[in-house]
Amino acid sequence: DFVKAMIMDGENLEQDQTRIQESKSDLEKQLQEDRKTLPIYQYRDALLQAVSDHQVLVIVGETGSGKTTQIPQYLHEAGYTKRGKIGCTQPRRVAAMSVATRVSKELGVKLGHEVGYSIRFEDCTSEKTVLKYMTDGMLLREFLGEPDLASYSVVMIDEAHERTVSTDILFGLVKDIARFRPDLKLLISSATLDAEKFSDFFDSAPIFKIPGRRYPVEIHYTKAPEADYLDAAIVTALQIHATQPPGDGDILVFLTGQEDIETAGEALKHRMRGLGMKIPELIICPIYANLPTELQSKIFEPTPEGARKVVLATNIAETSLTIDGIKYVIDPGFCKMKSYNPRTGMESLLVRPISKASANQRAGRSGRTGPGKCFRLYTAYNYYQDLEDNSVPEIQLTNLANVVLTLMSLGIHDLVNFDFMDPPPSETVIKALEMLYALGALNSDGELTKIGRKMAEFPIDPMLSKMIVASDKYKCSDEIITIAAMLSVGNSIFYRPPKDKLVYADNARKSFHEGNVGDHIALLNIYTSWKDTGFDSEWCYDNYIQFRSMKRARDIRDQLQGLLERVEIQISSNSQDFDAIKKAITSGFFLHSARLYNSGLPSSSLYRTVKHPHTVHIHPTSGLAKEFLPRWVIYNELVLTSKEYMRQVTQVKPEWLNEIAPHYYQLKKV
Ligand code: ADP
Ligand code: MG
């Protein structure tokens, strides 16, 4: 009987598997049908012809027309992958992952096999991979190992209109290799109207236009400026939801970053509860760069009948990702951007008004599948009078030390004559060279040093890579790569619970700061405690720490450890000697130093940056903010919200600045 039962089971299993296969091929069939409905499908043959006729092609088409997901597949079907890979760059890591996932489904292959993606600290490709989606920064780094991109038959610089620093640098590099690699096909694709500019830059390359379909979008402005854009966005979303039938369409809200998105998500949940049972379900879907991969796909799931979806997104949903079914767009008119002062070398993140071009892209997201509505939470006067026409390319707004170091290690020393589409201000380039010199990456002749060559191996900012390289001297590379990994995860280590539990979270957080060790050592303490539990998820939960962020830190740490071996730095541990660890940190971050400034006010927490005096504060989330204000500190980054804040702060001794960077801090100043 037992044997019989087993046979029966076997039969059932077989039946089940056939069923699974049938439904799988149904899904594949459906996906193949869907591909044919995209605007780009009609132009498939013409596009392939144009690619065959020209080495460089500029492609323009509305967002959602199918450029990113379809063009690499068309080229694959046409045989281009027989000669090499097709690489497609994205300015955002979430887009690279999400699009690769989609294309692997359309092709019916496992992600990481024929279709893969590569983003910083995460390589999901294999020897089989022929369609490779990657961030623009990763392709830039590939030049280090393969200066002619010999393994590629096609390179597609996608979302070119985003004009990130990496994309701008890639323009110059790929234009150069195209000259001596006539077999390489180059596609520059963009959602907006900069096409002429791209064409001009690439020696009058032809422009291939994909006519999109767009339904009319009704634009609404507010009568008066909104004092609180976040609250206004929440109220508008609820109004739409409460007054329009749910089957009507979903809502997309553009917010500035993770913090805004989390706050808005909580507020929406809370207020929905207050509205009671009569209101249909509202499904809240956040999407931002640091959102864990498992949660990213949620935004693409079809909305169940009788419910409505509200997507809370950063700029990523402006052109990089297309979410079907959006009928309402809420646009508060802001985005988070870097701002850089080349005179002082200070960089900070701040919330700024968007450009008209952005506002129009955002509005357009509501009219893809039918007529849409866009609610601008600013006045018509604001739009016409205050907004710039176009966003400023990032290369004009950011610290270039990282890029300059990469270019130097590619052997490109003459940055003044580099072929930029829009050259960065020369003072920004000079500042970058000065900074690399101060860090010891360049010598006084402007040549890359041994330290600089080691630093360039790490795909992270020069201050962080210098900290890692310097840890060799202080025999604490083990601790320092942990700190670097934790800093690289960003500000998503701590879980922020609802208000009533906040005090528990604060207490948990405090325990890692015992002895006012500073934020860097606190990060190390968190990681070490977690490691001691065997990387336990319960432990994270109990301590209000995000398990996913910790796993990511562990992955990054593993990779940094691999890179240490590559640059021949021994793993050494010096966990008891906090001064040694802090000195290694200071070796990377001495440019970010500040001293307590006696304003005469009681309990004043004003600090002055040392080199270019400037008033800053310790961020309230710092372990040092509350009880103890050290006289001298170094910080990881500056953020500008209501005030200019230093985030991730550690106490240092002033004599260390002299000892570590005598060329930068003359004695008399300290
Ligand atoms: P474009 O690059 O021209 O903006 P895409 O190729 O990104 O267009 O998108 C084409 C279509 O593919 C979108 O309209 C959307 O329906 C679908 N799509 C893209 N990415 C995903 C995804 N990750 N999940 C589900 N559908 C997707
Ligand atoms: Mg695209």
Image (cartoon, rainbow, N blue to C red):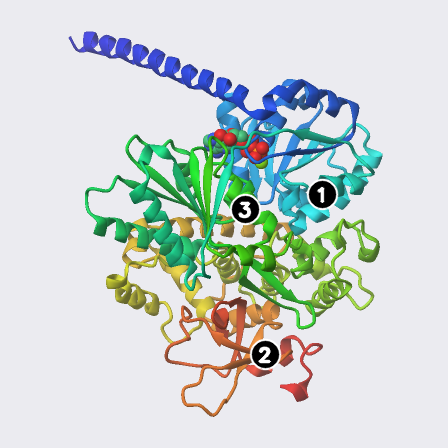
Q: Please give the name of the residue rendered at 50% of the width and 57% of the height, measured from the top-left corner.
A: 379
Measure the C-alpha gap from mark 3 to mark 2. 35 Å
Q: Is residue 652 shown left or right of residue 243?
A: right
Determine whether the beta carbon of the residue marked 1 sits less than 8 angstroms from the nearest atom of ligand 2: no
Q: Please give the name of the residue rendered at 83% of the width and 66% of the height, measured from the top-left corner.
A: 445
Local crowd at mark 1 within 10 Å, few (<14), some, or many (≥20)? some
Q: Is there a contact, CB below 8 Å, between mark 3 and mark 1?
A: no
The amino acid pointed to by label 1 is Phe
Q: Which residue is mark 1?
A: 143
Nearest the eye: 666 or 205: 205
Q: Please give the name of the residue rendered at 71% of the width and 29% of the height, measured from the top-left corner.
A: 208
Q: Quadrant of residue 241?
A: top left
N-terminal of the pair, mark 3 or mark 2, is: 3
What is the quadrant of the N terminus in the image? top left
Badge nearest the viewer, 1 or 2:
2
Nearest the eye: 84 or 342: 342
Determine whether the beta carbon of the residue marked 3 sits less than 8 angstroms from the nearest atom of ligand 1: no
Measure the C-alpha gap from mark 3 to mark 1. 17 Å
Local crowd at mark 3 within 10 Å, few (<14), some, or many (≥20)? some
Locate residue 147, reporting x and y percent: 75, 41
Q: Quadrant of residue 130?
A: top right
Locate residue 479, reporting x and y percent: 49, 62
Q: Is residue 259 above or below residue 120?
A: below
Q: Which residue is mark 3?
A: 121
The amino acid pointed to by label 2 is His
N-terminal of the pair, mark 3 or mark 1, is: 3
Q: Quadrant of residue 432?
A: bottom right
Q: Is residue 153 visible?
A: no
Q: Which residue is mark 2?
A: 614
Q: For numbered disc 1, what is the local secondary structure?
A: helix
